[in-house]
Image (cartoon, rainbow, N blue to C red):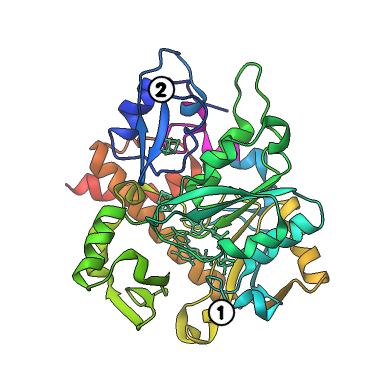
Amino acid sequence: MIKKPGSQTELKKNVLEQSLCTGCGACVGLCPYQVFYADRTVQLFDCDLPEGKCWAFCPRTPADYDHIKKSLFNMDDLTPEIGAVKGYYFSRAFDPRLRVNVQHGGTVTALLELAMGEGMIDSAVVSSRNEEFEQHGLLVTDQNQLRGYSKSWFTVSPTVAAFNRIPDDRKKRAGVVATPCQATALAKMKTAEIPGYNGSDLPGLVIGLFCGWTLSMEKFYNLLGRYGLSITDLTGMDIPAGKNILELFTAGGLISVPMAEVDHCVRTACRYCMDSTAEFADLSVGAARFGKDCEEMRGWNQIIVRSDRGKHLFELAVAKHVLQIREAPPSALLELKNAAVEKKKKALKNIVEKSHSTKNLLYLKSDDPVVRKYLGVEKKRKGKL
Ligand SMILES: Cc1cc2nc3c(=O)[nH]c(=O)nc-3n(C[C@H](O)[C@H](O)[C@H](O)COP(=O)(O)OP(=O)(O)OC[C@H]3O[C@@H](n4cnc5c(N)ncnc54)[C@H](O)[C@@H]3O)c2cc1C
Ligand code: SF4
Ligand code: SF4
């Protein structure tokens, strides 16, 4: 249920000009006026329509996010910390050849290959990079090509724009790899109430990525320069939990950059983001590198199974030996939930600091149960000011 329809002008005023744009790409490709340049969404011309899909789909416009969650997932599975949980495991691709060139355990790529191979989807939107290392969404229709687009790059990829370019009759047969903000946009597409529009079966599958933040390209490239590196020197990147470093892999070896130096490169919009586990995805995948087993778990993922569709794919992956599974101890789930709550509280604190009011939460509703639960701390803090 969309709270209030809005226009492209309002999108500009309330999202782009407020540094709330996540760069998800959901407003790009719907009309010729909105484009993506480098790592920014740009409005080329003004549109005079009073209501736009760009506003309706944007993950940073107000909506009843609690209602959307309840309409997409089983109520009994919902948790305040990380959304719906049907199952939680450690996983990695069974195929050792696949695991050679992936971010952690290759769970995402293995699941996409299986979903395509089994005919659950007939295409997948992943992230690709051009010669300048700018990322963009790419529609892959050949299962054998998916391994060419693995690994994580911590700059923005306007992936949802590539989903928008798929012909309408093929969208429900597509899978999308999505960060939390992108998965939110796709959930808004599914549930938007717009006359003459029906998104209920879009897209066929969403595989979410855990996400702490993304980096501003310009600032990150400057930081690399201080280490005598250019972006083309990087063969990989990672953020091991709890270590407060960004790892840069190069042909010359590993360089660990303290987070204190990276912090100013984090995109402003990410500071207002409550979701670290892609709560609107069918399945969500992240690193399992935390705690005392950090190094041993380098090649493994954490996976949250959320929807019936996600459960079906996960069970198939286990039965067909596509994924190797380890039971995750309850302490791991607790650690994940604690980290997710920290992100929610930090985002709410930043939102209140920006709006100067606990009643104006920008794109969030103050009576949303999850917001209410974690805003309590902020209200008390404000009361003391
Ligand atoms: C911006 C960003 C921040 C992240 N932050 C965290 C974090 O804080 N904690 C954590 O546990 N995990 C985080 N992850 C997820 C993690 O890096 C891995 O993507 C995840 O563990 C899956 O690993 P894998 O080996 O299964 O992935 P692979 O099998 O290697 O597949 C990775 C998939 O991600 C896609 N992709 C790469 N970059 C992007 C992008 N920028 N936007 C959208 N899709 C992309 C690729 O095209 C590929 O399909 C983050 C990922 C991204 C992209
Ligand atoms: S839809 Fe995505 S890219 Fe467009 S304004 Fe909103 S956050 Fe930015
Ligand atoms: S931190 Fe949030 S807003 Fe930023 S890229 Fe990740 S999901 Fe999107």
Q: Residue at x 31, y 78 (%)?
A: 256
Q: On the image, which quarter does residue 43 sit in?
A: top left
- Residue 344 is covered by the magenta coloring: no
Q: On the image, which quarter does residue 356 sit in?
A: top left
In this view of the protein, can residue 209 be seen by the observer? yes
Q: Nearer the viewer, residue 79 or 311?
A: 311
Which residue is disc 1 drawn over? 299
Please, is residue 225 above or below residue 355 in the view? below
Mark 2 neighbour density, 10 Å: few (under 14) some (14–19) many (20 or more): many
Q: Residue at x 36, y 23 (%)?
A: 10
| Residue 228 position within the rendered picture, expressed as x and y whole percent measured from the top left | 22, 73
| Residue 78 position within the rendered picture, expressed as x and y whole percent measured from the top left | 62, 51
Q: How many numbered marks, from 0 up?
A: 2
Q: On the image, which quarter does residue 131 sit in?
A: bottom left
Question: Which residues fall within the magenta stretch?
Answer: 55-68
Q: Indicate if the residue with disc 2 has its beta carbon within 8 Å of ligand 2.
A: no
Farthest left residue? 385
| SS for callout 2 | helix
| SS for callout 1 | helix
Which mark is on residue 8? 2
